[in-house]
Image (cartoon, rainbow, N blue to C red):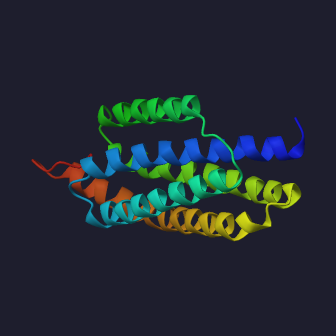
Amino acid sequence: MNHVEHYHDWLRDAHAMEKQAESMLESMASRIDNYPDVRARIEQHITETKQQITVLEEILDRNDISRSMLKDSMSKMMAFGQSVGGMVTSDEIVKGSISGYVFEQFEIACYTSLLAAAKKAGDMASVPAIESILAEEQRMADWLIQHIPDTTEQFLLRSDADGVEAKK
């Protein structure tokens, strides 16, 4: 593979990654009952993620790159597995916040690499869009890491109270 082919493959990966993120975030948001600030930020990021998918599809189309149905399907299956796994834990909100932060860091690394690949492949038209997506992922990661302590404290307070659901 040459560097343009790698770039095109990584664009497909980014599209599949965002499809996975969309599924995970929607599943998580639908189950959050007692942490309105976390739910609101996740819902905001769902909107951002959907827009990111649209932007990536525009980049794929502009470069005449087919989407990978296999990668998209596998990503959605992984998201489903992660969602089911979260439902059975007693501390879903805390583990969800931590795994959300880890996933954001993964996305940041992917978009950092994709940005360098876009430049090397000469796709300068896509650079601003990739930079914008990268900035959104960085803002989400920053928000999560800043709120994990408060979410954890709220969870611990709720779990100590009789008759109060804490997990979600």
Please give the name of the residue rendered at 23% of the width and 49% of the height, measured from the top-left corner. Answer: 166
Q: Give the residue furthest to the left.
A: 163
Q: Quadrant of residue 1?
A: top right
Total number of numbered discs in the rendering: 0
Q: Position of residue 38 (x, y in %)?
A: 34, 62
Residue that appears at 74% across and 67% down: 125
Q: Nearer the viewer, residue 119 or 99?
A: 119
Q: Is residue 3 left or right of residue 10?
A: right
Q: Could you say where residue 163 lies in the image, as x and y percent from the top left?
A: 9, 47
Residue 168 shows in this picture: no
The residue nearer to you, when weighing 136 against 160, is: 136
Residue drawn at x 64%, y 64% as measured from the top left: 134
Foreground residue among 159 and 19: 19
Q: Position of residue 147 (x, y in %)?
A: 43, 65
Can residue 3 be seen in the rendering of this structure?
yes
- Residue 149 vs 16, above or below: the answer is below
Quick check: 153 left or right of 124? left
x, y percentage for residue 35? Answer: 27, 60
Q: Classify 127 as above or below 72.
A: below
Q: Nearer the viewer, residue 160 or 130?
A: 130
Residue at 57% across / 60% down in the picture? Answer: 55
